[in-house]
Amino acid sequence: MTTTLVVMFIAGLITGFSKFSVGGMGLLVLPIVMIAFPGPEALGVLLPLYAITDIMAAYSYRKNISWAVLARFIPLGFLGVIVGAQLLSSIDEEQFVTLLGIIIVAMIALGFYLDTRPVSFMQKPWAAYSMGFLSGLISMISNAAGPLYSLFLLEQKLNKESYISTRAWGFFIINIIKFPLYISLGLLSQQSLTMSSYALPGLLVGSFFGYHFLKRVKQKHFKWLIRIMSTLAAIKLILFS
C-alpha cells in the first residue's frame, strides 16, 4: 500500500504540473502508475485524474474555442476511441505493456520530427480526419495522444488563446467519451476510483506549482528532460517487463 500511495502521489503531482504549465508529460505518467498497476487497469486509475484537470482547464478556457476545428477532428476521434476499446479487450497484459512502449517511442520520435520539419499538410481535411482517428485510438490505449493533437492544432494557425481553449476542450470531450468504455472493459470501478483518490493531494500540489512557476520553466530544456525520462520508461516496458 505504501508503494501505491507514493506512486499515485507522484502521478498526481506530474499530471497537475503538466496540465497547468508546459504540458507534454503524459508519456511519463502511465509508466509510473504501472509500477503499482502493471496492466491496462492503470488506464482506469489515471482517467479520473485527467477528467478533473480537463474540467478545470475547460472551465478556465471556455472562450475562443474553434468549434470548426473540433468539428473536423472529434468525430473520427470517437471512432478511434471505439477501435481502441476493441483492441484493449483483445490483448493480454504482456501485449499491452509492449504496445505502450512502442507508442511512447513513436510519440517521442514524432516530437523530434516536429522540431525540424514543417507539417503544413495538417491543414488538409484528410489530415484532420486521420489525426482525429489516431488521437482517439492512442488516447484510449495509452493516454499519450497529446503530441498528435498538438501537432494538428498548431498547424491550424489559431491564435494563442484559441489554441489553448480548443486544445483544452478537445481533451475534455475525448476523455469524457472514454468513461463508459473503460467501465464496460472493467478498467474503471469503485476500487480504481479509490486508487485514483490517492493522487488528489499530488494533483493539487502539482497544479499549484505548475500554475505559479510556468514563467520560470525553460521549456526547451524541460522538454528534453521529459523525452529522456520517457524513453527510459519505454525501454523498460519493452525489454524488462
Image: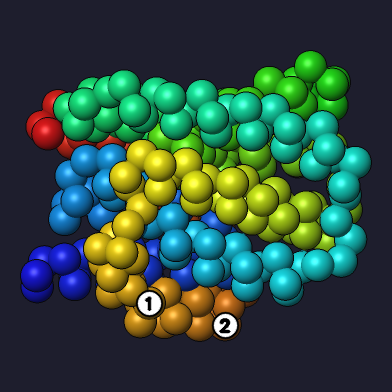
Q: Position of residue 185 (x, y in %)?
A: 36, 39
Element carrying mark 1: helix
For the residues carrying marks 1 and 2, which lies nearer the camera in this image? 1
Q: Mark 1 = which residue?
A: 200
Which residue is pictured at 26% across the width and 54% down the height?
33
Q: Is any atom of residue 156 visible in this view? A: yes
Q: Is residue 230 left or right of residue 144?
A: left
Q: Which residue is mark 2?
A: 212
Q: Residues within 10 Å of mark 1 (few under 14, many from 20)?
A: many
Of residues 37 and 226, the one nearer the viewer is: 37
Q: Quadrant of the C terminus?
A: top left
Question: From the viewer's perspective, is 210 left or right of 121?
Answer: left
Q: Residue at x 77, y 68 (%)?
A: 61
Residue at image position (44%, 31%) is 85
Label 2 element class:
helix
Spatial distance from mark 1 to mark 2, Cα to Cα? 18 Å
Q: How is the image coloured?
A: rainbow
Q: Is residue 71 left or right of residue 182?
A: right
Amino acid carrying label 2: it is His
Residue 1, x across and y down, in percent: 9, 70
**Residue that appears at 72% across and 72% down:** 59
Sooner in the amino-acid sequence: mark 1 or mark 2: 1
> Neighbour class for label 2 at 10 Å: few (<14), some, many (≥20)?
few
**Which amino acid is tagged 1?**
Leu
Q: Outermost residue toward the front?
A: 184
Say if 182 sits above or below 47 in the image.
Answer: above
Q: Nearer the viewer, residue 83 or 154?
A: 83
Residue 188, horizontal then vertical, whole percent: 36, 53
